[in-house]
């Protein structure tokens, strides 16, 4: 007992960490009062984070297309990721003025660059509409009718909400498939501009080699700004628009973080599949993910090769290539993680227990006895035709020209229907944005690449078996596509007038078109329509089954569940901490500028701007140095529960101030989408000190630091 005092020290040291446990959960913000966050390390009241009756941090968070952002000044300045602003940076770049290579810093507001295709949403309110949605479902409906009725009802609720309040944008989100639906109302901003982006040598340092990896040394941040009409209403881009004034902005804290700090994130995580069954996971593991890895590896290599000699072509491909590479590597991580952690087998074991519970009561058995089996049957049915379906549906994505033709044809057909019967993208409230996206994509169309893509897809299609109910004939389709591939280079998809003319045509006119792509699409579209119908039938069935599954699971586990991510606002919390990915390897949670310099080879993606190297050599870190060290923090690792869509989420400290910007996950955490685990689920963010140093010290945009209320020197 001589060392009793030592034990006390050990226990005291361990205590703060022990009660700072992180947990699985992307919690809807209405749930956070029940999370006891203050016991876990939060120093502000949960009502400061979310308060439906007052101003709170949530008012300072926005969705930036598929990413998240934070307002960091009263004048609509948004911090998000470099990779989230990538499309805007690419769109403003030319081979001679390459903002991806050089970075961009607007000298003043007039120089900020409009970013077509970008929209910003701020959650204003939300409320449960499950009853309203599900009241349209009748027992005698077929599965397809069920899906269509629910879709229609959701659109109707959205339109009614927007009619009642034209200033907002409404969306009904499915929280638990087939069970709960929530109406979200958003402020919707359509004039978004690029303010500052570091060069890719900072913002994408390490590129695909380091993507999804820790340690990481990437300054993945950028600034954008939201603009509205002078009267405060949302408007398309106009030079007369003024910066949006958010109800709340998040205060940047230039002191950053230290290991073990409590942190939380607010953001818009995209999709997870935690409530899906083992049969779904098996489908992912055996069928879909391997397909995607193989297909995307080929497409990425092809685009890379096409851009080798010509920077203008490389620029055209850069955004698409980057997102394919992101998904390809994530899919590999997921495959590895699914195998290593035996996630599918683990879920099957949980389901076996659930099945015993179901079978232990005759009434329960009557109601739920076949649910798991029927779900499994659904996925195995999908598996049988997956090769064909995945290939044909990727055909009109691989070939952009076919995709353009499909969209034009589809839009023309859908426009004949009453608004509520149309696919959502073509409803009156959405069609302008759909067309805008088409035009932006067409601008990057490169005929030679498209030709090679089409040839490759023909070869892939020739290897798959077409199902008996396909409404295209395999040989006839292959012959048509082959003839088409010989015509690609003469097509005019990148000419705006060409697109406009086609967009103005009715289905009847299109069916008589002599454009070779439209001609092929006229024959192929019925097959895509069949597949869309099949999708609706499947989701009608699955949603109904999953609705029952969640009911009985709740009865069994006697707990409430957190809904899967669905692009709506969520909170997750954890702490700054490392992990051990494999035997004898321990990863610590903060990387430094020394690490950047060590990794720098001078060859992309490991180049570093000269000024960064010079300031590093001079140890000139301004106000942002790591306490007690001649170094700068670059990236941080923490145990929150995140997925795609959390890109750009603010990393907030115990006081609710912004200490970093989330941009990725560690390789092992790619399986967060299927299962979260305290021992290896780690998210990655850029430390705010690095972002501030790069912006102010390296690129001289001190005015932005001042705007955020941060001292520059
Ligand atoms: N880097 C990721 C993405 O863009 C973010 C994440 O998934 O955690 O998908």
Image (spheres, rainbow, N blue to C red):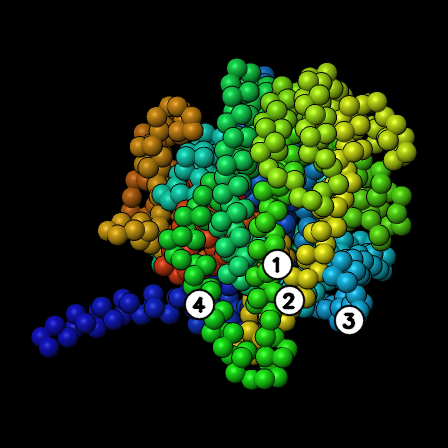
Residue 96 in the image: above or below residue 339: above
Q: Nearer the viewer, mark 3 or mark 1?
A: 1
Residue drawn at (85%, 38%), measured in percent from left and top? 412
The residue wearing badge 1 is 378
Q: Which mark is residue 545?
A: 2
In primary-sequence order, the first of circles 4 and 1 is 4
The alpha-carbon separation of the residues under discs 4 and 2 comes to 19 Å
Where is residue 464 drawn, in percent x and y? 59, 37
In primary-sequence order, the first of circles 1 and 2 is 1
> Is residue 600 among the parts visible in the rendering?
yes
Q: Do residues under tags 4 and 2 come within 8 Å of each other at their CB atoms? A: no
Residue 133 in the image: above or below residue 170: below
The alpha-carbon separation of the residues under discs 3 and 1 comes to 20 Å
The alpha-carbon separation of the residues under discs 4 and 1 comes to 19 Å
> What kind of element bears circle 4?
helix
Q: Using the image as rendered, state which of residue 466 and residue 680 is in the foreground.
A: 466
Q: Do residues under tags 4 and 3 come within 8 Å of each other at their CB atoms? A: no
> Is residue 253 among the parts visible in the rendering?
no
> Which quadrant, please, contains the C terminus?
top left
Q: Around disc 2, counting alpha carbons within 10 Å, would you say few (fewer than 14), some (14 to 19), or many (20 or more)?
A: many
Residue drawn at (81%, 39%), measured in percent from left and top? 411
Q: Which mark is residue 139?
A: 3
Could you say which quadrant of the image residue 415 lies in? top right
Please tell me how many numbered marks the rendered image carries: 4
> What kind of element bears circle 2?
helix
- In the visual, does 590 lie left or right of 6? right
């Amino acid at each position: 007992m001589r060392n009793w005092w030592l034990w006390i020290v050990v226990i005291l040291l361990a205590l703060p960490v022990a009660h700072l446990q992180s947990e699985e959960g992307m919690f809807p913000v209405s749930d956070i009062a029940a999370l006891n966050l203050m016991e876990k390390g939060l120093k502000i009241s949960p009502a400061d984070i979310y308060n439906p009756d007052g101003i709170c941090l949530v008012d300072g968070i926005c969705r930036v297309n598929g990413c998240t952002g934070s307002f960091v000044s009263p004048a609509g300045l948004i911090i998000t990721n470099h990779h989230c602003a990538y499309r805007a940076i690419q769109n403003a770049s030319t081979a001679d003025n390459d903002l991806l290579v050089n970075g961009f810093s607007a000298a003043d507001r007039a120089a900020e660059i409009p970013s077509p295709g970008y929209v910003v949403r701020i959650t204003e309110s939300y409320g449960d509409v499950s009853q309203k949605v599900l009241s349209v479902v009748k027992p005698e409906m077929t599965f397809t009718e069920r899906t269509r009725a629910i879709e229609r009802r959701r659109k109707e609720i959205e339109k009614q909400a927007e009619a009642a309040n034209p200033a907002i944008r409404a969306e009904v989100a499915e929280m638990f498939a087939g069970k709960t639906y929530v109406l979200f109302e958003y402020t919707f901003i359509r004039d978004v501009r690029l303010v500052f982006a570091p060069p890719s040598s900072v913002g994408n340092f390490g590129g695909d080699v380091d993507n999804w990896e820790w340690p990481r040394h990437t300054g993945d941040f950028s600034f954008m700004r939201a603009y509205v009409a002078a009267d405060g209403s949302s408007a398309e881009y106009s030079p007369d628009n003024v910066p949006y004034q958010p109800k709340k902005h998040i205060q940047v804290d230039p002191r950053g973080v230290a290991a073990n700090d409590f942190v939380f994130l607010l953001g818009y995580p995209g999709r997870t599949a935690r409530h899906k069954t083992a049969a779904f996971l098996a489908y992912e593991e055996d069928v879909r993910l391997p397909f995607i890895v193989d297909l995307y590896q080929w497409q990425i290599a092809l685009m890379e090769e096409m851009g080798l000699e010509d920077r203008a072509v490389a620029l055209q491909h850069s955004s698409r290539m980057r997102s394919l590479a992101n998904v390809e590597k994530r899919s590999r991580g997921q495959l590895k993680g699914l195998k290593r952690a035996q996630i599918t087998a683990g879920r099957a074991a949980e389901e076996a227990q659930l099945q015993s519970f179901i079978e232990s009561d005759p009434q329960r058995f009557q109601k739920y006895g076949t649910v798991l089996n029927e779900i499994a049957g659904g996925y195995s049915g999908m598996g049988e035709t997956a090769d064909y379906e995945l290939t044909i549906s990727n055909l009109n994505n691989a070939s952009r020209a076919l995709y353009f033709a499909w969209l034009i044809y589809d839009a023309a057909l859908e426009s004949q229907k009453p608004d509520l019967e149309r696919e959502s993208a073509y409803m009156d409230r959405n069609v302008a944005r759909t067309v805008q996206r088409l035009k932006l994509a067409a601008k990057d169309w490169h005929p030679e690449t498209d030709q090679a893509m089409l040839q490759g897809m023909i070869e892939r299609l020739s290897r798959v078996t077409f199902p008996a109910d396909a409404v295209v004939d395999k040989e006839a389709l292959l012959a048509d596509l082959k003839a088409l591939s010989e015509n690609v280079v003469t097509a005019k998809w990148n000419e705006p007038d060409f697109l406009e003319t086609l967009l103005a045509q009715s289905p009847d006119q299109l069916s008589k078109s002599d454009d070779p792509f439209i001609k092929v699409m006229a024959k192929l579209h019925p097959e895509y329509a069949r597949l869309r119908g099949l999708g609706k039938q499947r989701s009608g069935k699955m949603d109904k089954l999953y609705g029952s599954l969640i009911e009985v699971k709740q009865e069994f586990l006697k707990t409430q569940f957190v809904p899967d991510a669905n692009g709506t606002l969520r909170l997750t919390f954890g702490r700054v901490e490392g992990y051990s990915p494999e035997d004898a390897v321990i990863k610590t949670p903060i990387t430094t500028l020394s690490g950047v310099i060590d990794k720098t080879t001078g060859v992309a993606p490991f180049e570093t701007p000269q000024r960064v190297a010079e300031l590093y050599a001079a140890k000139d870190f301004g106000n942002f140095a790591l306490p007690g060290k001649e170094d700068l923090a670059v990236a941080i690792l923490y145990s929150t529960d995140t997925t795609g869509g959390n890109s750009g989420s603010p990393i907030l400290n115990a006081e609710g101030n912004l200490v970093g910007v989330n941009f990725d996950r560690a390789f092992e955490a790619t399986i967060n989408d299927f299962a979260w685990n305290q021992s290896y689920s780690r998210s990655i963010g850029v430390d705010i000190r690095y972002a501030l140093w790069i912006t102010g010290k390296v690129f001289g945009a001190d005015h932005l630091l001042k705007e955020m209320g941060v001292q520059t020197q």
